[in-house]
Image (cartoon, rainbow, N blue to C red):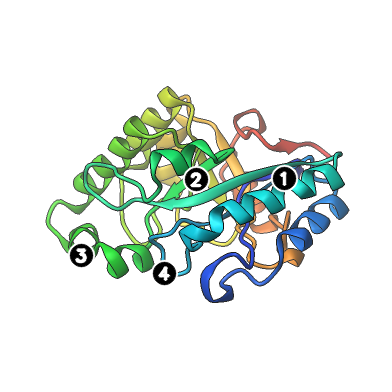
Amino acid sequence: MKITKDLHTHSRYSKFYHGKSTIREVVEAAVAKGLKTIAITDHAPDHMFGVWPFLLKKRKREIEKLRKEFPNIEILCGLETNLVSQKGNIDVTKKQRENLDICLMGFHKTAGMFLHPFFALKMLFGKNKIERNTNAYVSAIENNKIDVITHLKQYINVDCGKIAEVAAKYGTLIEINNRHLFFNEDDVKAMLATDCKFVIDSDAHRARNVGEVGTALEFVKKYNIPIERIVNVKKD
């Protein structure tokens, strides 16, 4: 199996060089590995390593320039947004969202504790955590146009089946993240019992890791996730 798209990568537009490579280097790596689509999805502004808001337009202009230079690969301008409230709010404005080709969303401690500590502490340590955390994800999917839920179950526990059911209804993909896999067998069974679709991503922070998803592919084989349920996989 191989992936045709990598929808989760980071670049040097991240604060403090959280992403180690330029967008050009990420795109060149994607081309070299035969990918048809590459998405640049640095963390959104509320993350400790998120893109500074004043750089978002510059970042998009660079992506638009590279599209002309590399016409044989689809280059998407995106962000990995952060779940920042129990009501399902995420850290992009409506105007910023309109300028994105793809919107990812996950829960990150480095976003929550940095600017939304009360919410983060409740998600991490409060009572009825699974129900509350699950409802926050559900609200985010219902109230925002989210294309991909990233590394579900990292940091906080949730009901994967319930989230997958809502994700299927709204056309939101559940990510199988090559770097951060926290699903167990029961989680997979619960998600497969719904109509949700999956996407395998590298979550690359360096160009050399773009498209590298060996761990995720082994996970797919181990738990017999049907290839037809994964939107970016083809057989060798």
Mark 3, mark 1: which one is toward the viewer? 1
The residue under label 4 is: 48
Q: Residue at 74% across / 64% down in the picture? A: 207
Q: Whole-percent x and y of residue 48?
A: 41, 69
Give the labeled residue for mark 2.
104
- The span from disc 3 to disc 2 (Cα, nearest Å) is 22 Å
Going by the numbered disc 2, the residue's amino acid type is: Leu
> Which-is-in-front pick, marks 4 and 3?
4
Q: Which residue is mark 1?
A: 64
Q: Residues within 10 Å of mark 1 (few under 14, many from 20)?
A: some
Mark 3 and mark 1 residues within 8 Å of each other at the beta carbon: no
> Which label's residue is closer to the chain start, 1 or 2?
1
Crowding near pointer 4: few (<14 within 10 Å), some, many (20+)? many
Q: Position of residue 73 (x, y in %)?
A: 81, 41
Q: Where residue 223 sits: x, y (%)? A: 56, 44
Q: Answer yes or no: do the residues labelled 1 and 2 have beta carbons within 8 Å?
A: no
Does the residue at mark 4 contact the one at mark 2 (Cβ under 8 Å)?
no
Q: Residue at x 37, y 55 (%)?
A: 107
194 lies left or right of 2: left
The disc placed on residue 17 is none
Q: Outermost residue, bottom direction?
A: 16
Q: Amino acid at mark 4?
A: Met
Determine the secondary structure under disc 1.
Answer: helix
Q: Amino acid at mark 1?
A: Glu
Which is more N-terminal, label 1 or label 3? 1
The local crowd at label 2, few if under 14, some if 14 to 19, many if 20 or more residues have their Cα within 10 Å, is many
Camera-nearest residue between 64 and 108: 64
